[in-house]
Image (tube, rainbow, N blue to C red):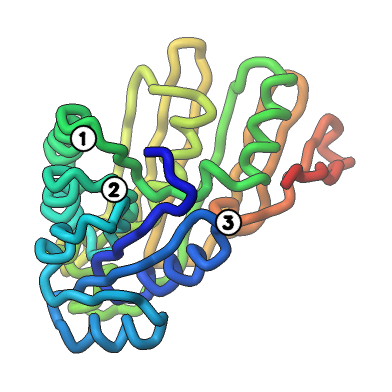
Amino acid sequence: MNKETINWGIISTGRIAREMTDALKLVKDAQLIAVSSRDVERAAAFSREYDLMDFYGDYKEMLQDEAIDLVYVATPHPFHYENTLACLNAGKAVLCEKPMAMDKKQAAKMIKTARKKKVFFMEALWTNFLPSFITLQEKLTEMGDIRYLNADFAFPAPHDPNGRLLNKELGGGALLDIGIYVIFAAYKLMGMPETIKAQGYIGKTGVDEQTSIIFKYKNGGMANLFCSLQVNSKTNLSVYTPNGMVELGHRFHMPALPYYYQDIQKPKKMSVKI
């Protein structure tokens, strides 16, 4: 795709869709031109609010719009598979909200379809592109093998059985909603583990309310990962090597200031390249 401006369509009108719409306003070569929702009135209201060219009550109808280059899928977790496949089969590039699928089988089919259609497809995990996370990666390349990684992400969710976070039918649970961030950090910085051990607490609604995971690597490195919808945590990412450690502080999945520790008592703030 070689265009001065990329025309976007968006599926859904919820909170994530609104945040993405606001973010696209900051991108010089991006223009959101259409929105679709199962409720055409909501799509119309969204279109008026953001001054979009078109709105649709059926996302499959929106995919027939030849002006759209790329679609952001912002629907609840269980709909990502169906929505993404429809986009890919229509020849539309896709940026899909995390988690991109409900299981390995779905994810494999989505990737296979994108490759077959030769269409761009990516999971929308912004942490990978944050200057703070990139700076952390750069520092770690100077410090030798990672021996230990610790990452947590937790907050107390409202105990609403019908709410998205605790509703099994809506893909609820700590692992799919926030555990993806701690797992991403380990995969990105340490690669695929040799063994995985996990334990979780399944609540009354049938979803995991807490999950703890240990990754073990061939070189002896280990990662300790935790996610929860029951308690608050610092949401920190700490990475240890024989030559020191690097830490992304509170809410590491968002823009944060990295700290480098060679002497554990004397942390050094690191400048972030933007």
Q: Amino acid at mark 1?
A: Ala
- Which residue corresponds to the image point at 37% horizontal and 75% vertical from the top-left? 15
Could you tell which of marks 2 and 1 lies nearer the N-terminus?
2
Could you tell me if the residues under marks 2 and 1 are in contact, i.e. CB atoms within 8 Å? yes
Relative image position of residue 236 (x, y in whole percent)? 60, 50
Please name the residue that numbered disc 1 is placed on: 114
Depth check, mark 2 against mark 3: the one in front is: 2
Image quarter (top left, top right, bottom left or bottom right) of the N terminus: top left
Q: CA distance from mark 2 to mark 3?
A: 22 Å
Q: Tell me which corner region of the image, top left, top right, bottom left or bottom right, holds residue 33.
A: bottom left
Res. 144 mark: none
Depth check, mark 1 against mark 3: the one in front is: 1
Rendered position, 139 above or below 35:
above
Please name the residue that numbered disc 2 is placed on: 94
Q: Secondary structure at mark 3?
A: loop
* Other-residue count near label 2 (Cα within 10 Å), few / some / many at <14 / 14–19 / ≥20: many
Res. 254 mark: 3
Q: CA distance from mark 2 to mark 1?
A: 9 Å
Rendered position, 269 above or below 215:
below
Could you tell which of marks 2 and 3 lies nearer the N-terminus?
2
Q: Amino acid at mark 2?
A: Val
* Other-residue count near label 1 (Cα within 10 Å), few / some / many at <14 / 14–19 / ≥20: many
- Which residue corresponds to the image point at 16% horizontal and 55% vertical from the top-left? 83
